[in-house]
Amino acid sequence: MKIFKSIPVLLLVLFITKAKAQDDIPTLSGKVTISIKEGTFDCDVTLSNIPPLKDYFLRLNSGMNVLHFHSLKPKDFLIGYDRSLKDTTATGEANAYFFPDNTGKGKYLPKEIRMKYTGKFPVATDTIENYSRSDWKGNIAFNGYSVRTDGSQTAWYPVLYDIEKDKAYSEIKYDIEVACSDCTTLYVNGNLPVKATQSRFKSDVPKELSLYCGNFDFKNRGGTYILNPNLTDEQFSEFCNLTNSYQNYYEKKLGIPFGGAVTFVNTTPTSIRNSWLFVTYPTIFSIGHGENGLKSLFNPKIQNWYRPFIAHELGHYYFGTYKVFNSELGDMMSEGFTEYLSLQVTRDILGEEVYQKKINEKLKDLEGFEPTAFSKVNSKDDYKDRELYVYYYAPLLFTAIEKEIGPSKMWQWLGTLLKEKTDFTNYAFLIKSLETTLQNKSKLENIKSKYFESEVSLKNIQSALK
């Protein structure tokens, strides 16, 4: 009888735990008014379901001018606020706000906050006279016919950051109204695009609120959308077949289902030459002029360079969305393992010749680079050159380890990294996951000494990949 009586109690505990986890996900509601001609955001939004954090920052884009922060719960009053320069994990686009408590020594965090703020940003209407020197992921980019934002880096909406756990609440639930009188199409990450100047967007599944609104059309095939497409129907079909093959490959190798259909945004930068991709799942943004956009997939001169980029961005579903990485090595793991996934797609789908060319190019670009061993990295500053460290050095290091332990164990390790629960994805986590995978102390020590701890790890990588 005791056993049967304990079952409802256990279920109740599980239910309460799950409900608490859901309650800890912030929710954004309210109205956002945009003008793509004027380059403006006018926001009246409320952040609710705020977790009880003791040490935090509230990130908001530095171009947003705050009218006020208004506590709604547990008490109704305008809140005094301050800003900090100690938010070292922020990328520079956002201010770090906090609310001092009555003592002036600690921080106060309401359970529900209403915020009113307005921002005005440059509009780049052409590439002859009216354009910017550079464009980047964290830019709130008005290019004359549309506006593009990601969520976490631009922080156009309030992003709560837990200092103690190094966790940013950029993926949130939302129920917002978006209005843009000079737009024909509106899109919010996690919803379908709509032909309208005003629409309500809602998601009970936490998403990063990237936006793409403006004057453009879109195509749909089997749930895969391309916004602002410049592809023929035949190219669009080939594109969907290619991306589906990438997703199926990752699912099979990792044993983790891909998270559903992806929406692709094809747009131009506010600058002349910048061209890149980034992902805020389930949206992948492709930024570039003319042949440097999605059409690059069909240009024989550069398609073997561009198609692995698409594989990289799709790989970020696993390393970046399915599991979010933090701590001093978090950036390296998120980008390095994703680039490693892209290399596997390149070899097994695009061909050995394309794969070997990419390996050789990365090895060449690393000549003269002196990377800091993983075990000695205390902050991102120790990367020295972030691009070389996370996109070249790290994926080649993982490729060298693959040579040591074999492809099967390598995929098993990737699965362990993704599935193992931890608060911090630091060096200790990296070692523990590999130890769990190998179950072989001598192999583990060999890899640690050659690749994770050695000052000549790059030479060891070069030797392994020759």
Image (cartoon, rainbow, N blue to C red):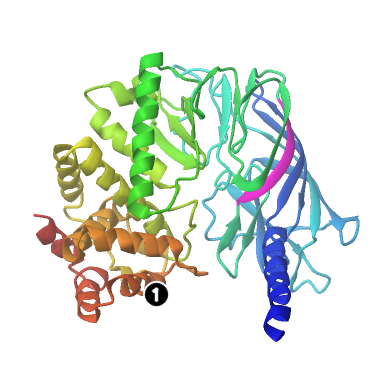
Could you tell me which quadrant the N terminus lies in?
Answer: bottom right
- Residue displayed at 36% across by 50% down: 338
Q: Amino acid at mark 1?
A: Ala
- Residue displayed at 34% across by 39% down: 246
Q: Quadrant of residue 127?
A: top left
412 or 170: nearer the viewer = 412
User: What percent of the width, then of the height, locates residue 145?
Assistant: 57, 19
User: What percent of the width, then of the height, locates residue 75?
Assistant: 90, 60
Query: In the rendered view, does 87 fall on the left or right side of 256?
Result: right
- Residue displayed at 33% across by 59% down: 384
Q: Secondary structure at mark 1?
A: helix
Q: Is residue 189 magenta?
A: no
Residue that extends furthest to the bottom in the rendered view of this protein: 2
**In the image, residue 373 above or below residue 212:** below
Residue that extends furthest to the right in the rendered view of this protein: 76
User: What percent of the width, then of the height, locates residue 87?
Assistant: 58, 60
Q: Quadrant of residue 110?
A: bottom right
**In the image, residue 261 above or below residue 270:** below
268 or 123: nearer the viewer = 268
Please give the range of residues in magenta: 170-179
Mark 1: give few (<14), some (14-19) or many (20+) Cα within 10 Å. few
**In the image, residue 106 above or below residue 118:** below
Q: Is residue 176 magenta?
A: yes
